[in-house]
């Protein structure tokens, strides 16, 4: 669970950074940097989702053993 919390925190920090940079990037027309931010966020979101899915599987397995 700690790993999931850390992953969510990292994802939120990355998202906050992107949102604060976004107006400057849009005004500067920096599509490359915007795209890179988006890819990084998608990657972090996928990692977080995988951690969540693994925890759910583990919890189900433990419940079945009871």
Image (tube, helix red, strand yellow):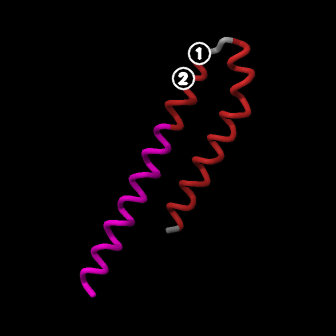
Dot 1 surroundings within 10 Å: few (below 14), some, or many (20 or more)? few
In this picture, which residue range is highlighted in magenta?
42-66
At horizontal 65% and vertical 46% (from top left) the residue drawn is 13
At horizontal 59% and vertical 23% (from top left) the residue drawn is 34
At horizontal 43% and vertical 45% (from top left) the residue drawn is 46
Q: Quadrant of the C terminus?
A: bottom left
Position of residue 38 in the picture relative to residue 29 (left or right): left
Dot 2 surroundings within 10 Å: few (below 14), some, or many (20 or more)? few
Q: Position of residue 35 (x, y in %)?
A: 54, 23
The disc at residue 35 is 2
Query: Contact, CB < 8 Å: mark 2 with mark 1?
Result: yes
Q: Position of residue 50 (x, y in %)?
A: 39, 53
Give the structural element (helix, strand or loop) at label 1: helix
Position of residue 9 in the picture relative to residue 3 (left or right): right
Using the numbered discs, state the Cα–Cα distance from disc 2 to disc 1 in whole angstroms.
Answer: 6 Å
Q: Position of residue 57 (x, y in %)?
A: 31, 66
Q: Position of residue 20 (x, y in %)?
A: 73, 33
User: Measured along the vertical axis of the image, is residue 2 above or below residue 34?
Assistant: below
Tell how many labels. Answer: 2
The front one of 66 and 10 is 66
Give the structural element (helix, strand or loop) at label 2: helix
Q: Main secondary structure of the magenta part?
A: helix
At horizontal 48% and vertical 45% (from top left) the residue drawn is 45
- Confirm whether the magenta stretch covers residue 61: yes
- Confirm whether the magenta stretch covers residue 59: yes
Position of residue 22 in the picture relative to residue 42 (left or right): right
Q: Quadrant of residue 36?
A: top right
Given the current orientation, which residue lies at the most extreme bottom position? 66
The disc at residue 31 is 1
């Amino acid at each position: 669970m700690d790993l999931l919390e850390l992953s969510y925190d990292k994802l939120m920090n990355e998202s906050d950074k992107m949102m604060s940079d976004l107006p400057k990037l849009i005004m500067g027309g920096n599509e490359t940097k915007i795209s890179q931010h988006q890819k990084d966020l998608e990657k972090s979101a996928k990692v977080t989702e995988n951690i969540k899915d693994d925890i759910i599987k583990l919890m189900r397995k433990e419940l079945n053993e009871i």
